Amino acid sequence: MSNWDSGGFRLVLEIISAAAVLLGLIFVGLELRQNTAAVSAQAIFELNDSSNNAFRDVAQNPQLSELISRGYADPQSLDENELDRFNYWLRSAFNSHESAWLYFKKGLIEEGDFAGWKGSLCGLLEQRGAQQFWIRNLGNYADGFVEDVNRWCVE
């Protein structure tokens, strides 16, 4: 029996097996990268779609637009029903921003994609009515989100 028949053949099979495993791992890594990119694109689409729907609602409804403008400037000028509607609108806005923050923290959207959401959030908190809502509703949001928002926009 030759060297090739015993140990040499086994060595070649082990090398081929190791190469196959390595190629399989590379393939899995590439698939994961593509899947992550698809999930990121879907997350950005969903966030933008949600935001665009809210903006469209305001643009198409002059009463809602006027209510939000008044609520931003002076929430005390709103009657009870208007204040409820304004607070629901703000809750929706802050919830959308928290979702963007969660996607960012989980690595589903990149910092550059999140920068617009961060700027929008800080712009929202420049409005007196939004500031008052934020202070009253801190407990409704994730602690990390509250800490980041306060660091970026409030402090």
Image (cartoon, rainbow, N blue to C red):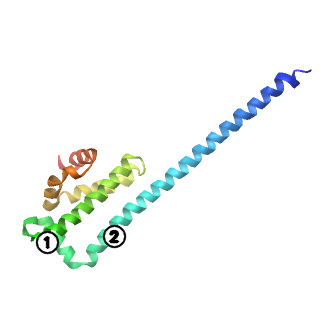
Mark 1 or 2, nearer chain start: 2
Q: Are marks 1 and 2 in contact (CB under 8 Å)?
A: no
Mark 1–mark 2 distance (CA, rounded to whole Å): 23 Å
Residue found at x 80% / y 27% = 10
Vertical side of 87 occupied by 98: above or below: above
On the rendered structure, is 59 left or right of 5? left
Q: How crowded is mark 1: few (under 14 residues within 10 Å), some or many (20 or more)?
A: few
In the picture as drawn, the residue positioned furthest to the left comes out as: 76
User: Viewer-proximal residue, 128 or 11?
Assistant: 11
Look at discs 1 and 2 and give the one toward the viewer: 1
Q: What element carries label 2?
A: helix
In the picture as drawn, the residue positioned furthest to the right comes out as: 1
The residue wearing badge 2 is: 53
Residue found at x 70% / y 38% = 20
Residue found at x 41% / y 47% = 107
**Quarter of image, res 136:** bottom left
**Quarter of image, res 21:** top right
On the rendered structure, is 117 left or right of 6? left
- Tell me if residue 74 can be seen: no
Q: Position of residue 119 (x, y in %)?
A: 28, 55
Q: Position of residue 152 (x, y in %)?
A: 24, 48
The residue wearing badge 1 is: 81
